[in-house]
Image: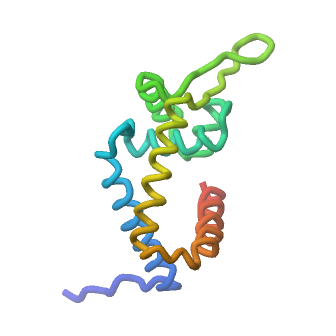
Amino acid sequence: MATTAPPRPRDAGLADLADVLLTVARDLQQRHAALEGVVALTATETTVMRHLDRNPGTSPSAAAAATGLQRSNLSAAVRSLEAKGLVERSHEGHDGRSVALRPTALAARNIALLRAHWAERLHRALGGDDAGVHGALDLLRRLEHGLAAER
């Protein structure tokens, strides 16, 4: 029985970039789990916290749409984040029926610890030479926005 070769990516460079991104992200994610003072989060909780940090006061529906999560999965993550003291829910609007989600001071501390840890690890990994970081960041933000637009 003959086997067919897997399809070749249209641009092998982009496939290689995705592979490296996944490896780096996995390494950063795994290594911070034991970081002292950091509240451990699941991947879904991390996705929700990233969105709320960038968009405090967003509604659950908007957060679900922006993150690509099912509303039920977002609700479960928000309940867990509330229990961990990282998210607070408030009722807003003239009738109080609108709900806004905001990160807490503990969440801000958690994120600050993680960002400092990530920056230090990447600084060491680059041997202190951060040339090209801003260009790479621009490219990765373009990818992030382009992928989000496909959801």
Please identify the residue farthest to the right as the structure is shown: 94
Q: Position of 31 compared to 45: left or right?
A: left
- Closest to the observer, 137 or 36: 36
Q: Quadrant of residue 7?
A: bottom left
Q: Residue at x 44, y 60 (%)?
A: 120
**Number of labelled discs?**
0
The percent position of residue 83, horizontal first and vertical second, equals: 42, 22
The N terminus appears in which quarter of the rendering? bottom left
Q: Residue furthest top?
A: 95
- Give the residue at the far front of this rendering: 128
- Could you tell whether 121 is left or right of 4 in the image? right
Above or below, 128 relative to 53: below
Instruction: Give residue 13's position: percent from left, percent from top.
Output: 49, 84
63 shown above or below 7:
above
In the displayed structure, 26 sits above or below 73; it is: below
- Left or right: where does residue 32 sit relative to residue 118? left
**Quarter of the figure with residue 148:** bottom right
Q: Position of residue 119 (x, y in %)?
A: 48, 59
The image shows residue 23, relative to residue 84, as above or below, that is below
Which image quarter holds the C terminus? Answer: bottom right
Q: At 45% from the left edge and 32% from the top edge, which residue is drawn?
A: 77
Q: Residue at x 59, y 21 (%)?
A: 89
Of the pair 86 and 128, the residue shown nearer to us: 128
Please name the residue shown 36% across and 67% down the image. 23
Of 94 and 10, the residue lying toward us: 94
